[in-house]
Every structure is written in C-alpha cells, then in structure tokens.
Image: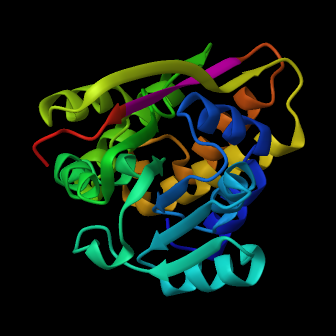
C-alpha cells in the first residue's frame, strides 16, 4: 500500500465531512494538539487541522518519505507539522498530545497492533484521548456475490492476512486493546463506512476497482485456481459490482479512551 496509485485512491475516497463527524465524536475541537499517527497523504491531517483552529496544532507522522513529501507539498499549512517517523519506534521527541488519532492503520499491522497501541499511549497528556478507527469484516460484505467469486475473494483476503499481515477484522479488536491497557472512559461508536447500493457512482467505482487491482497483484499466484485466471476474476467482480442490484457495506468502529493513570 505504498504506491502513488494508493495515495491517489485514498485522497479521492476521503470524505471531508465524514472525517469531521468522526473527529467530533472523539471530542477533537479548537485548541487541541493532535497526533495523526499514520497520516499517509496528509489529507486527513489537514481536515483535523481545520477543527483545532484557532490555536490548535496537528502533527502527522508516516514512515514513508514519499508520502510525507506528498503531504508537505499538498497539505502543508499553518498549524500542521509533518515528520518521517515510524510509530514502531520511540515517539518521545514529538511531545505530548491531547488526542492521538489512528485511522485505517492497524488493519495493515495484524501482528503488531497491540504493541502499536501501547506505544501511542505514551504520546498522550495525562488526560489525553487515544482515538482508534478501523473497519471490521473489510472487503467481505457483499450481496449477492456469485459463489465462485465469493470463494476466491475469501481466499485472497485470507492470503493477505497470513502472508501480508493484513487484518480484515481490525475494527472488532479496538475496544479490547484499550480495555486491556486500562484506558478510562472508553466510548465506542459504529457507523457505516462503505454503503453501496443502486447505481454506482464514479468515486466508488474508482476506489473499489483500484482496491481489487492492488490486492490482486499482491497475491497474483492464487488466481491460478480461478477459471480464466485473474483477468476473468476481475471481470466477474466488476460485472457484479456494476449491477445496481448489489449491496455492499463495511462497518467502521470508532473507539476512544482516556489515557490510563499508570502509563
């Protein structure tokens, strides 16, 4: 998920109003200092920055120099500071924050998620909040997907899970991470992220086409099992997805907790 195509895809699909609604659910507002951990292109950081003004600050970190360069060029603004930094390592130099925001990141770190959450906790001020947002049953909720396409799609997701550290069930685990670390005042909200029915709009068409292409290329060998190979699978999925009868959704889980007293 490091390509320029992926940066473009996520920028296009990012809904500014949806981000603002989620951030407000987490309590982010004027004057707050916010860490956007795994900021990717910087677009979400820029939206959060609107909410914390006046007098607030957003710091975006990502381990990719390419993505941080893109963020600075496209979303660099007063009140936003971007850094190349890996959240697997020490973060103390960033200082302390009122809020740490992590959206759509833990799904790419199935094995390390708990340790990442624990490390982010150290970035919070004594009564700061950690806000985790991720999908559950990611890319798996469709009706009425043809049986052969459904079987192959589940195999693709399983291979990504086992060989590429992807977690299609990241969202359902967020509450337990905060509970096990003794976070206080934990709050959980569930909202639809993808909700697709009827005529397909251009944004969803682009997003899902690129998503299937990117995931498929990562596990291309598995399509030897599908009649006609990858090209046939992609065509069959596209035919299903462009049918206005289909229904598709992904639940987004938003989990917020106050920093534990003992950390």
Q: Position of residue 99 (x, y in %)?
A: 45, 49
Q: Is residue 148 visible?
A: yes
Numbered range of the magenta stretch: 247-256
Which residue occupies the foreground of this view, 228 or 236? 236
Q: Can residue 14 be found in the magenta stretch?
A: no
Q: Residue at x 31, y 60 (%)?
A: 123
Which residue occupies the foreground of this view, 191 or 12? 191
Q: Position of residue 88 (x, y in %)?
A: 24, 68
Q: Residue at x 64, y 43 (%)?
A: 29
Which residue occupies the foreground of this view, 168 or 98? 98
Q: Residue at x 88, y 35 (%)?
A: 201
Which residue occupies the foreground of this view, 244 or 3? 3
Q: Position of residue 108 (x, y in %)?
A: 36, 53
Q: Can residue 252 be found in the magenta stretch?
A: yes
Magenta stretch: helix, strand or loop mostly: strand
Q: Position of residue 28 (x, y in %)?
A: 58, 41
Q: Quadrant of residue 120?
A: bottom left
Q: Quadrant of residue 94?
A: bottom left
Q: Is residue 169 visible?
A: no
Scheme by which the image is coloured: rainbow
Left or right, 241 with reference to 137: right
Left or right, 106 with reference to 11: left
Left or right, 164 with reference to 197: left
Q: Residue at x 43, y 40 (%)?
A: 131
């Amino acid at each position: 998920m490091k390509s320029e195509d992926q940066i473009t895809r996520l920028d296009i699909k990012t809904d500014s109003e949806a981000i603002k609604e989620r951030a407000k659910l987490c309590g982010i507002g004027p004057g707050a200092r916010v860490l956007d951990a795994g900021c990717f292109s910087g677009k979400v950081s820029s939206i959060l920055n609107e909410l914390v003004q006046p007098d607030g600050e957003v710091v975006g970190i990502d381990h990719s120099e390419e993505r941080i360069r893109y963020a600075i060029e496209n979303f660099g603004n007063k009140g936003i500071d971007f850094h190349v930094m890996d959240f697997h390592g020490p973060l103390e130099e960033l200082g302390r924050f009122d809020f740490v925001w992590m959206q759509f990141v833990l799904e790419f770190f199935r094995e390390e998620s708990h340790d990442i959450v624990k490390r982010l906790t150290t970035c919070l001020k004594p009564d700061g909040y950690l806000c985790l947002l991720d999908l559950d049953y990611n890319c798996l909720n469709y009706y009425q997907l043809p049986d052969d396409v459904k079987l192959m799609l589940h195999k693709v997701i399983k291979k990504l899970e086992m060989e590429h550290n992807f977690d299609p069930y990241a969202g359902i685990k967020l509450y337990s991470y905060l509970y096990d670390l003794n976070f206080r005042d934990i709050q959980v909200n569930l909202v639809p992220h993808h909700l697709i029915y009827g005529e397909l709009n251009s944004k969803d068409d682009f997003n899902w086409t690129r998503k299937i292409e990117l995931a498929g290329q990562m596990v291309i060998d598995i399509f030897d099992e599908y009649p006609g190979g990858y090209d046939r699978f992609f065509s069959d999925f596209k035919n299903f997805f462009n049918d206005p009868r289909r229904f598709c959704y992904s639940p987004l889980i938003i989990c917020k907790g106050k920093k534990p007293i003992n950390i």
